[in-house]
Amino acid sequence: MEFSHDQRTLDLIDRVEAFVHERAILAERVLDEQLAATPGEWSFRPVVGELRDAARAEGLWNLFLPGERGAGLTNVQYAPLAERTGWSPRLAPVAFNCAAPDTGNMEVLADFGTPDQQAEWLEPLLAGDIRSSFCMTEPDVASSDATNIATRIRRDGDSYVITGRKWWSTGAMNPDAAIFIVMGQTDPDAERHRQQSMILVPRDTPGVRIIRPLTVFGYDDRDHGGHAEIAFDDVRVPAANLIAGEGEGFAIAQARLGPGRIHHCMRAIGMAERALSLVQERANARVAFGRPLAEQGVVREWVAESRIQVESLRLLVLKTAWLMDTVGNRRAMTEIQAIKIAVPRAVQQILDRAIQLFGAAGVSGDQPLAEMFAGARSLRLADGPDEVHLNALGRAELKAPRR
Ligand SMILES: Cc1cc2nc3c(=O)[nH]c(=O)nc-3n(C[C@H](O)[C@H](O)[C@H](O)COP(=O)(O)OP(=O)(O)OC[C@H]3O[C@@H](n4cnc5c(N)ncnc54)[C@H](O)[C@@H]3O)c2cc1C
């Protein structure tokens, strides 16, 4: 394994770090003010557009996407950059056009889309002209098992007709999310993993109805376009909108989630580093019972435990990135599952300690810790709950030949 950064990555780290610290973090307060001044408004607030313009002008754009269409970075090259964006999870990923769910949707279109689909939807997403949503999870079925998805996609002549209900469609409250990738059943009688397909549904298609925004621990995540519950009532789209082919939905979902999971973990490590830097400042400045918090044994223990977790998990994430680059996403599945379980869990713990150190300020909106905690906690569900990954990882471990 080779984890030293090449010159290109070192240059990008410097530029991304400067952008995050000198622009994104400073813009967080501005974003709060703009959100407060425009309740009920779901499109990007002006400060997000300004950051995006600046990042694009600096060439810090589509860093996540390998190949010619994106920045062409490997996972090992992208990992330290994504980590730095995690310092400002509300603004930095979106500023660089590297925010979920657009990233995963762009990967699906790049890997599985037809040239027409790519021209119509991938190009404007890459240019940052539109946003998108990924609609798999449903209120009425246990959606951690993708084979349960019950939305129907029926062929009717030159069209498909979609009927069902989705929720937790991240980004869909933003009116600029012009395209939804919807997963549904095309053939309930097919073999279990061939029943599902994915189809492109433009937001303005008749029958698409946004029912309500959901909240995460009370946060509406307006800066990410929120999370929507959506009804699809006899929504008719051209047959050419199907992605890859009937029965390919499950395979596309698996392919989509590999890179998405590692990106989440990289950013989560950045959140932990920001929490540790806030802790360092606070622990040295704040005095209780006659000495700085930094001199209390328990605080030192918390910080030491957190540092050990960050360092060991970063190595596991880098190993996973290296495996994805060298043997492919499929053969790196065990490690992808391991980091998806271990990183959000540890980062949640690190943020919890940081909140405790900050006292009541820690749970307030004056510090980023509470919102980051909500994000880390949610990550233990999004892109597959811990237990599903634990189950698969344990099964593979028990079957694997031992040396
Ligand atoms: C902030 C956030 C953003 C999200 N964004 C999106 C999005 O953009 N698009 C989208 O489609 N979805 C999204 N989701 C939904 C997310 O992917 C689902 O919540 C997740 O897949 C779990 O599905 P479920 O909620 O239906 O839970 P269920 O399937 O009902 O599972 C509930 C619980 O059962 C247990 N369980 C399930 N299976 C097993 C097993 N095999 N072994 C042991 N225990 C098990 C687990 O503890 C699990 O948490 C998002 C969720 C959150 C919180």
Image: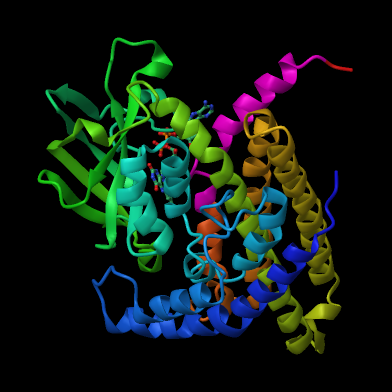
Would residue 195 appear left or right of 144 to someone viewing this image?
A: left
User: Which is nearer the eye, 131 or 367?
Assistant: 131
Where on the image, by quarter, is ligand 1? top left
Q: Is residue 161 above or below residue 37?
A: above
- Looking at the image, residue 305 sits to the left or right of residue 232; the answer is right
Quadrant in which residue 216 is drawn: bottom left
Q: Which residue is drawn at the image coordinates 55% and 64% (left, top)?
A: 372
Check the picture and name the quadrant holding the C terminus: top right
Q: Residue at x 36, y 24 (%)?
A: 148
Q: Is residue 300 magenta?
A: no
Whole-percent x, y for residue 352 in the image: 63, 62
Q: Is residue 217 visible?
A: no
**Front-lying residue, 125 or 45:** 125
Residue 188 drawn at (x, y percent): 28, 15
Q: Is residue 387 magenta?
A: yes
The quadrant the N terminus occupies is top right
From which residue to which does the magenta span run? 378-401
> Which residue sits at x=66%, y=75%?
15
